[in-house]
Image: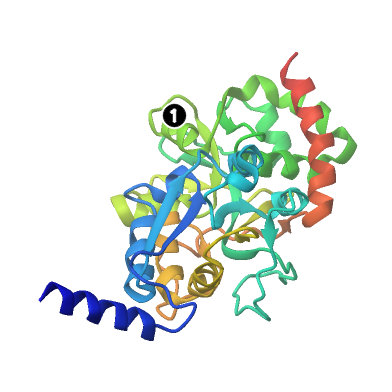
C-alpha cells in the first residue's frame, strides 16, 4: 500500500507544470515590525496569499523600514529574503544602489495614487501623508505650520531618520520647506523634541501614554482610533506648507531561488486580497483602491499640497539633510 501511495505521489509531482509552487515552497518576505504584528496586515495577507499559491509565506520582521536595507547589505548574497516589503520612495535609489534587486517586470501597474509611478524595480503597496497627530482634549490650539510648532511649548516625539522611514520623511519634509535653512529650523525645533525613537511604534506608544503632546505619524492615524476604538479625540494637522508624502514599496531580490513565486506575490500585492487589508490594518491608503472602497475617516485630512522627492533626488538630499539634523540636535 505504501509503495502505491509513493508511486502516486511521484506521478503527481511529475505531472506538475514547471514553475508551479507546492506547499513545500516557501516565499520569504522581509518587512517591518508593525506589518507582521497581530494587528497589522501580515496575518491577513499570509492567509490570503497561501490560499492561492499552494506555498508557505514567511513574513520576517526586521525592525523599522529603514533597517531593511541595512539588513540586506549585511547579509549580501547569503540573504534568505525573496521579497523586501516596506522601504519607501525615499530609499528606492539607495536600495537600487545595492544591486540586490531585480526589475519587477510589471507593465503599467493598476494604481490609484495621486502621483505617477515610473519605477521599474519597485512596486508600491500603499501611500499616505506624514502629519503631526495630537489629542484634541489636551491641545486646544494646534500649530498650523512649522513656525508655529517651533514657537510653541508643545512637546513632540519623532523618529530617527537613520532607522525609521517616518523619521526620514520628516527630515525631507523639513528640507523641502526650508531648503538651506533646514539646519537652523531644527535648532529652533530642538527644545520641542522630547526624544527621538528608533521606530514609529515606540514613538506612537509614548504619545498614547501621554509622554508628549504630539507625535510624528500620518494623516490617517486618527482613523484607527475612530474605527477601532470609537475614539474621535485624535486629530492630524494639514500644515500650511504642505505635508510630505510617503509611498511604501516592495521589490524582488535578484538572487531569489523562488523567482516565479516572487513574481506571483508582486502580482497578488496589487489585488484586493492584499489591498483590502491595508486601510484598517496598516492605516494607509492602498496603492490600488479595493472594490469595497475606503473606510470612514480616510477623507478627514487631505493636505492641500503634497511634498515629495523621488529616487536619486531623495537619496542625494538625504545625506545633506541628515548631517544638518545631527549637527542641530547634538548642540
Using a 10 Å C-alpha cutoff, classify the residue at mark 1 as few (fewer than 14 neighbours), some (14 to 19) or many (20 or more). Answer: some
Height in image: 290 above or below 193? below
Height in image: 221 above or below 11? above
The residue positioned 56% from the left and 29% from the top of the image is 156
Q: Position of residue 327 (x, y in %)?
A: 79, 21
The residue positioned 31% from the left and 82% from the top of the image is 12
Q: How many marks?
A: 1
Q: From the viewer's perspective, tell me whether residue 217 is left or right of residue 304.
A: left
The quadrant of the image that shows the N terminus is bottom left
**In which image quadrant can residue 195 be found?**
top right
* Along the line of sight, the residue nearer the viewer: 225 or 99: 99
Q: Residue furthest right?
A: 180
* Along the line of sight, the residue nearer the viewer: 115 or 178: 115
Q: Position of residue 47 (x, y in %)?
A: 32, 65
Q: Residue furthest top?
A: 331
Q: Which residue is mark 1?
A: 206
Amino acid at each position: 500500500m505504501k509503495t502505491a501511495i509513493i508511486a502516486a505521489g511521484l506521478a503527481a509531482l511529475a505531472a506538475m507544470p514547471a514553475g508551479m509552487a507546492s506547499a513545500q515552497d516557501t516565499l520569504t518576505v522581509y518587512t517591518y515590525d508593525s506589518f507582521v504584528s497581530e494587528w497589522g496586515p501580515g496575518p491577513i495577507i499570509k492567509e490570503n496569499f497561501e490560499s492561492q499559491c499552494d506555498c508557505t509565506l514567511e513574513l520576517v520582521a526586521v525592525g523599522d523600514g529603514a533597517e531593511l536595507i541595512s539588513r540586506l547589505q549585511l547579509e549580501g548574497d547569503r540573504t534568505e529574503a525573496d521579497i523586501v516589503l516596506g522601504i519607501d520612495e525615499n530609499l528606492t535609489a539607495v536600495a537600487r544602489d545595492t544591486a540586490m534587486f531585480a526589475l519587477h517586470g510589471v507593465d503599467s501597474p493598476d494604481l490609484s495614487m495621486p502621483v505617477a509611478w515610473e519605477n521599474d524595480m519597485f512596486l508600491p503597496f500603499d501611500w499616505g501623508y506624514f502629519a503631526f497627530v495630537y489629542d484634541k482634549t489636551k491641545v486646544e490650539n494646534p500649530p498650523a505650520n512649522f513656525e508655529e510648532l517651533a514657537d510653541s511649548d508643545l512637546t513632540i516625539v519623532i523618529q530617527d531618520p537613520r532607522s525609521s522611514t517616518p523619521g526620514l520623511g520628516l527630515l525631507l519634509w523639513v528640507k523641502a520647506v526650508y531648503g538651506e535653512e533646514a539646519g537652523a529650523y531644527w535648532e529652533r525645533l530642538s527644545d520641542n523634541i522630547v526624544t527621538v525613537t528608533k521606530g514609529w511604534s515606540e514613538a506612537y506608544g509614548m504619545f498614547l501614554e501621554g509622554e508628549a503632546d504630539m507625535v510624528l505619524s500620518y494623516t490617517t492615524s486618527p482613523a484607527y482610533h475612530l474605527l477601532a476604538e470609537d475614539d474621535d479625540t485624535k486629530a492630524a494637522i494639514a500644515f500650511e506648507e504642505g505635508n510630505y508624502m510617503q509611498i511604501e514599496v516592495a521589490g524582488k531580490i535578484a538572487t531569489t531561488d523562488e523567482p516565479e513565486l516572487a513574481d506571483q506575490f508582486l502580482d497578488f500585492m496589487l489585488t484586493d486580497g492584499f489591498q483590502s487589508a491595508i486601510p484598517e490594518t496598516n492605516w494607509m491608503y492602498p496603492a490600488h483602491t479595493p472594490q469595497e472602497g475606503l473606510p470612514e475617516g480616510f477623507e478627514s485630512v487631505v493636505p492641500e499640497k503634497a511634498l515629495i522627492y523621488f529616487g536619486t533626488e531623495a537619496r542625494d538630499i538625504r545625506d545633506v539633510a541628515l548631517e544638518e539634523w545631527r549637527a542641530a540636535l547634538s548642540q
